[in-house]
Amino acid sequence: MRFLLVEDSMTLASAVLDRLRLDGHVVDHAPDVEQARAFAEAADYDLILLDIMLPDGDGRDFLKSHRQARNETPVIVLTARSAVSDRVSVLDLGADDYITKPFDFSELEARCRAVLRRRGGGASTVQRFGDVTFDPLAGTLTVGDRRVSLRNKELRLLEIFLSAPDRIFSKPKLVDRLFSYDEDVSDNAIEVYVGRLRKHLVGSDVEIVTVRGMGYRISRA
Amino acid sequence: MSRAAQISGSIRRRLIGQLVLGSAVLAAVLVLLVTNLARNVAQDTQDSILMASVTSILDTMTVRDGEISVDLPYAALSMLGNVSEDRVFYRILADGQLLTGYEDLPDPGDPGRDGGYITAPYAGTEVRMATAERRLSVAGTPIMVTVSVAQTRQGLMQTLAQVSRRGAAVGIGFFVLAALLAVLTTEFGLRPLRDLAGAVSRRGPKDLRSVKGPVPQEMAPLVISLNSFIDRLRYSLSRSEDFIAEAAHRVRTPLFTVRTQAEIALRRVERPENRAAIKEMIRALDESSRAAGQLLDHAMVTFRTDHLEKERVLLTELAEELVDRLRPVADLRDIGLSMQSEGTPEVLGDAVLIENALRNVLDNAIKYSAPDSDVDIRIGREASDCFIMVRDHAGGFPEGALHRMTERFARGDNAGGTVGSGLGLTIAREVLEAHGGRLTLENKGDGACVTLWFPAS
Ligand SMILES: Nc1ncnc2c1ncn2[C@@H]1O[C@H](COP(=O)(O)OP(=O)(O)OP(=O)(O)O)[C@@H](O)[C@H]1O
Ligand SMILES: [Mg+2]
């Protein structure tokens, strides 16, 4: 996905940039309102992450002009505090959601997904691999004329596999991305989800292969 | 937050007291003036009749054959009888020798050229006596004749008493009217002050707008200083709340950047022991960040409950919004949130606090539940209380330690490795207690059942 991050704190911004890029997203960074406007006009983003307190103005002003310009890109506001008045005003101004800084990346990811799903992200996000069709926003997997709804962890796991077909993902790495660090799960917990995905993929030419001692990869038969 | 001020007197009482006292003095003076005037008028009337009578007697006195002859005119004394029932006495002296009349009438002293008056006791009562002299020439010798006419004063006294009674009645009437006016004027005059006090005391503790509205000129300095006080209060209050938010932000931002770097490192590191170390570090960072967040949330809750501002809060609406917001987070662990609401329970309270309490309870339900389970929220009314009940299937609170879980920093054995600071339920309990409600913890079936009880508004 393509993000625009509008945030003046450099330490916070670089952490967010690094982390989102690590997950394979393309992220541009604007440290103030003026540059944010320039970026938003120049390129199409899937999502804008907007800080409210900016050196040359209020993020809310950007939000207002962004909506007046009929720019449909969803905006998630990054607030420093969770006071009701703050969020009500940003939601009224047309923000799609807000998240309190500092946030958990899995929460941010979950919110982005929810926002994009609400906005009806369109066909562009639908992925085809072999004879299966995967819609990560709707959370559906279609095999022939059979369509199943994926649960969240199944969906995220499939997303990870499909981000790099044929690449081997180790169990520990998959656990890291699927569970939070305080969840007391063994590496084998991943087997449950792999098992479920395999069941959904029955009858297709796509399979999740166990690579002994290494992990798993997704491949076409 | 009603603290009694040190009270010294009341403007109202003082004003009314002074005004009433003033009218009493005025009424008394009025009565005195009226009776005095009446007395003088009555006295003057009697005096002039007495003197007229004396003069008419003098006028009839002639010298005939070297003798002084007195032809006491009937009219002279009868005009006195007209005035009242009072008895009349007279005496005519010629060079001090009694010519006719009552010899024992009091001595008039020197009446002077125009005649004189005295008041003296006589015949067992008091008389008013007019006296005048005239020089007559009897056989070439001048003889001084002195005529005195006296009258008792009962009639006069009666009239005077009557006039005094009327005067007193008028005085009392005047006093009552004036006192009534004093009370009315005071009430009316103090109304702007009372209106101001009312307008300020009716406000919620969070209503820190300046006092507007027309006030009398005399009260302008009071209102101006009140407004500047309100401004300062608003400033310092907003600073404390901002301070709490700012502090949380400041503490957590560096933790956040370190954590992000650690996460990135974890993706690149392969060796299990290094991975374990980094994970341990991330956990510690999460613990610190959570503790900072919860501590400052707790401070915010304490601050807000100290200045509790109550407004109408629709529980269903508040819960729906919060549940919608938590859904993506619950989704991460495939936990379903379902909500069921009966009626439209409404409570009086601080929405920010209530939301915070519910968020902590829901947060627990999500956090301690196993993946793929459900959390049910029920909102309704029982008797006169409104409730929000959160049930999960997470195995429940540790039996026996249930009552301890709302204490500060208390964490159960079941918390295991989950990140937490043990403040969530403390915050929830304090919020509910500040609203006059309570938080109940139970174990039901295979999970916990936490209920937020509010007294109905
Ligand atoms: N829904 C629940 N099911 C089982 N145990 C629970 C539940 N909610 C709370 N507990 C227990 O009660 C303890 C206290 O909860 P509390 O929310 O106060 O603190 P915490 O969740 O540990 O930390 P935090 O302040 O981060 O919320 C928890 O440590 C846990 O042992
Ligand atoms: Mg908790």
Image (cartoon, coloured by chain):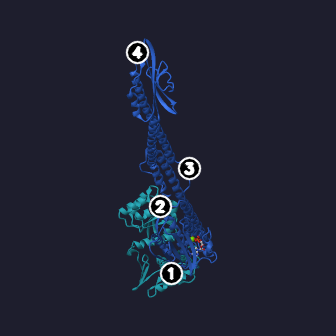
Chain colours: A cyan, B blue
Q: Mark 1 points at which residue?
A: A217
Of all chains, the one bearing label 3 is B
Say which amino acid is labelled 4: Asp
**Quarter of the image that includes the N terminus of chain B:** bottom right
Q: In which quarter of the image is ligand 2?
A: bottom right
Q: Mark 3 points at which residue?
A: B7
Q: Does the residue labelled 3 lie within 8 Å of ligand 1?
A: no
Tell me the CA gap for discs 4 and 1.
Answer: 174 Å
Say which amino acid is labelled 3: Ile
- Which label sits on residue B255? none
Tell me the CA gap for discs 3 and 1.
Answer: 83 Å
Q: Are dots 3 and 1 in contact, CB under 8 Å? A: no
Q: Mark 4 points at which residue?
A: B65
Q: Are marks 4 and 3 on the same chain?
A: yes
Front: mark 4 or 1:
4
Q: Where is residue B70 in the image (x, y as percent from the top left)?
A: 41, 22
Q: Where is residue B444 in the image (x, y as percent from the top left)?
A: 56, 80
- Which label sits on residue A7? 2
